[in-house]
Image (cartoon, grey):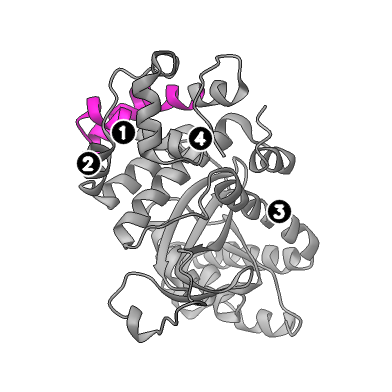
Amino acid sequence: MIHGLNYNEQDSKYMLLNEIFKIIDSKFSRMIMTRNGIKPLSKVIPLVKTIFISIYFECDISFVVEELKSKSELREGLNFSLVLEAHEIYDRLSRVDPDKLENTVNSILNRLRNDYRRGKRTFIMDATPADLNINFRSKKVSKESLEDKDYAWAWGTSIGFYIGYKVTLVLDYNTKMPVYFTIDRGSPNDTTMVEKILPILQKKQIIRKGDRILMDRGYYSYDNYKIALQKFHIIPLILTRTKFNKLKLENILDFPLHLFHAKSNLKKVKKQYMRLVNELLESLDKRNEIKFHRGYIEDFFKLLKEGLGFKNLNRYTLKSIRKYTSLTVLLAGIIVHLRINTKTDFQKFAEGKFY
């Protein structure tokens, strides 16, 4: 339980928060917000900072507003030139276009990751339940009653049945920072998400030929190996299941006919494709390594849920959950950029052990 926001410049929690706010106040963040139509900045910056405090300390926006209004040392310490009323924050946020907000978040995180120079990269993709905490045990909730809602019945291996959404996230392995997320009503099967998300990552120029993407066994299917390699020319390191047949996969991944129509040198194209196939087949034998490296995304989800209160959603429209997720992912991404490099760092933050 939080008793009050008592600013102390020597407190590690507030030291980190000030570093976060320096990024939000920075010239490049302001330019990105303006370019995406998130304005006026005189209201947007204090709005984002107030919501960040609410997420960071897991308290209501109205409580944060009252604390800021009543404590001058808190306003000065966190560089608030203006304190917005809670109703104005809710009103302004409701009018923000979720697409523009997501583009803003992605652009700020791209700038922090310094994505402009890069070689071959590794990404991690996974999903987590977004549970609305609706008590369906005390009152029966049928599928039919949710047909006109943005949320739906779903299943998560970690929590069983729930009502809500599914958040699928893609992390850059080197920086441990998010590069893309999407929210789906209910809980679509993970195997269908590969064909949905890879074209988006390619269009946004997040993934490029020769990159690797780690996925858990929920995404396992022979078709997904084939789609990733033949359509997108990336290496899908999906955790295999017990009935996995390596020889069957090799046969499926024979050189595809459509590459014979490539305008570039056929010999070169075949060599590049077979290099990707061979790298995949060699990597699949290193199951424990894939499992270990893929675990970083579970650490990121734990940071979101245990460190930033993402498990207490109480948002019942897709627009609302998209905007809340965008801001929470931005905050988590900045924290990772500033403080987190290892699994131990993730654990410390998730347990509230600021440093």
- Give the residue pinned by disc 3: 293
Give the Cα separation between the discs numbered 4 and 2. 23 Å
Q: In the rendered image of this protein, does residue 247 appear above or below residue 54?
A: below
Find numbered disc 4 in the image and state the secondary structure of the residue it sits on: helix
Amino acid type at image mark 4: Ile
Q: Is label 4 or label 1 in front?
A: 1
Give the Cα separation between the discs numbered 2 and 1. 8 Å
Q: Is label 4 or label 2 in front?
A: 2
| Residue found 73% across the figure and 63% down from its top | 283
- Give the residue pinned by disc 1: 47
Whichever of labels 2 and 1 marks the residue nearer the N terminus, that label is 1
Whichever of labels 4 and 1 marks the residue nearer the N terminus, that label is 1
Amino acid type at image mark 2: Arg
- Near-viewer residue (239 or 133): 133
Please check the rendered image and state whether residue 46 is part of the magenta-colored stretch, yes or no: yes
Amino acid type at image mark 1: Leu
| Residue found 43% across the figure and 25% down from its top | 21
- Near-viewer residue (306 or 259): 306
Region in magenta:
19-47
Whichever of labels 4 and 2 marks the residue nearer the N terminus, that label is 2
- Near-viewer residue (82 or 33): 82
Give the Cα separation between the discs numbered 4 and 1. 17 Å
| Residue found 67% across the figure and 66% down from its top | 280
Q: Are marks 2 and 1 in contact (CB under 8 Å)?
A: yes
Give the Cα separation between the discs numbered 2 and 3. 40 Å
Mark identifier at residue 92 = 2
- Give the residue pinned by disc 4: 334
